[in-house]
Image: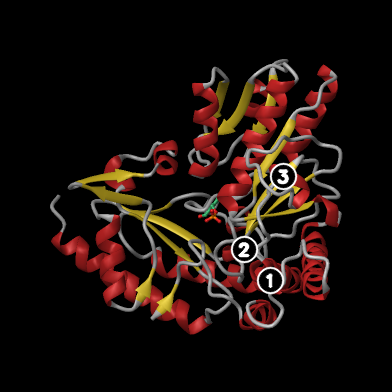
Amino acid sequence: MIYLDNSATTRVRPEVLSAMLPYLNDNFGNPSSIHKQGRQAKDAISDARKKVATLLGCLPEEVYFSGCGTISNNTAILGRARFVEANALPRHMITTAIEHPSVTGPARYLESLGWEVTYLPVDAQGFVTTDSVKAALRDSTSIVSVMWANNEIGVVEPIAEIAQLVSDYAATIGREIFMHTDAVQVPGKIAIDLSKLPVSALSISGHKFGAPKGVGVLFLRRLVNIMPIFFGGGQEMGLLPGTEGLPNIVAIGEAARLAHQEQAELAARLTAYQKRLFEILSVCENLKITGPADVAHRLPGHVSVAVAQLEGEAMVLRSDLKGIAVSSGSACHQGIIEPSAVLRALRLPDSLAQGALRISFGRDNSESDVEEAGKSLLEVFRKLQATAVR
Ligand code: PLP
């Protein structure tokens, strides 16, 4: 099996597994206990916080451990919304048409509470333009959430420019605008330096870069307020309470250390794979790249295409039979093929959007995987094209 679905999830790295195992075993203490076992657990969490802070280029006290990317996104948006409401600030939010449901969901919920939400459109390649952000900002804007990199079409948004624009606009109205970015697809692929990126909050998730599922991080800049949306025993400064998932926190710390160390080398390798696969697939008739064609503006290792007249799920299942694990952006619900909201936002014709496929390389892949997968995928496309109803 050649696993090419690393944007969905990644294998736990062996170094990460070794680092976390003792915390499932001998070092099982509760970090809130004051005995030796507890103190050891507390130290391990503090160590992991430092490692994540190094990956992000922020202070350790700006790192909050959460249960996953979804929880980080919800906590940032709904937590700030609570603060906005508690302070009777205006209730306008800006987000985009291509966010993950863990951002779109909170945005829709806020609408149901009477907030106004602007969903920024994207251009044909999936870019949010700075002009559209400028046009959407208003005196009443209190929250902006724009993803850094999209999981389905690999587009990397101009997040530094957008964040700067929001920050400059906030200065002109003399009021803080909470700027959040979903960076779940970013660690290990693109360098992150929060000492230079003017965002208030950022979300990441462990299972996308070699830690297990069930642990994430919310970066919240010092002196930026949000209010909790969960209530409990006060852990994570009362923002994300609940007994800490000690082994998972140790794991995300180790994964962050490795991702930081290896980012440049991994990005270069994944970009080479990505270029080569685009080259191999380009000979297929009626195939269109979804997201930017220029890999300089894509997530390293992320390849997404759509083939006219084909069905995404059929492509995934045929590829699976050939030992290639990939994914599609279109799902079949009771016989009707529904392109995802992201593909819809690109305004692709349905005949193309229903044939969407995502191939995402990871650190375990090799050059021979690229060649073998490219050959198999072309065979799958041709076979399905030969039988497609036109
Ligand atoms: N945001 C993006 C861009 C994602 O790709 C994902 C996961 O697919 C999430 C958020 C949610 O992360 P998690 O699976 O950790 O809840």
Disc on the earlier residue, 3 or 2: 2
Residue at which label 1 appears: 255
Could you say whether the residue bearing mark 3 is in a helix, strand or loop? loop
Q: Is mark 2 within 8 Å of ligand 1?
A: yes
Q: Amino acid at mark 1?
A: Ala
Q: Which image quarter: residue 29?
A: bottom right
Task: Using the image as rendered, state which of residue 352 and residue 103 is in the foreground.
Answer: 103
Disc on the earlier residue, 2 or 1: 2
Answer few, some or many: residues within 10 Å of disc 1's Cα (few below 14, many 20 plus, some between 14 and 19).
Answer: many
Could you say whether the residue bearing mark 2 is in a helix, strand or loop? helix
Is there a contact, CB below 8 Å, between mark 2 and mark 1? yes
Disc on the earlier residue, 1 or 3: 3
Q: Please tell me whether residue 38 is drawn above or below residue 332 in the rendered image.
A: below
**Is 217 placed left or right of 193 in the picture?**
left
Dot in front, 1 or 3:
3
Please name the residue shown 33% across and 50% down the image. 330
Residue at which label 2 appears: 206
Q: Please tell me whether residue 330 is drawn above or below residue 295 in the rendered image.
A: above
Task: Using the image as rendered, state which of residue 219 and residue 308 is in the foreground.
Answer: 219
Task: Using the image as rendered, state which of residue 30 and residue 89 is in the foreground.
Answer: 30
Q: Please tell me whether residue 250 is drawn above or below residue 155 in the rendered image.
A: below
Q: Where residue 239 is drawn, which disc sits there?
A: 3
Residue 287 visible at all: no
Answer few, some or many: residues within 10 Å of disc 2's Cα (few below 14, many 20 plus, some between 14 and 19).
Answer: many
Dot in front, 3 or 2:
3
Residue 88, image x, y percentages: 72, 16
Residue 66, image x, y percentages: 65, 54
Q: Is mark 1 within 8 Å of ligand 1?
A: no
Residue 260 visible at all: yes
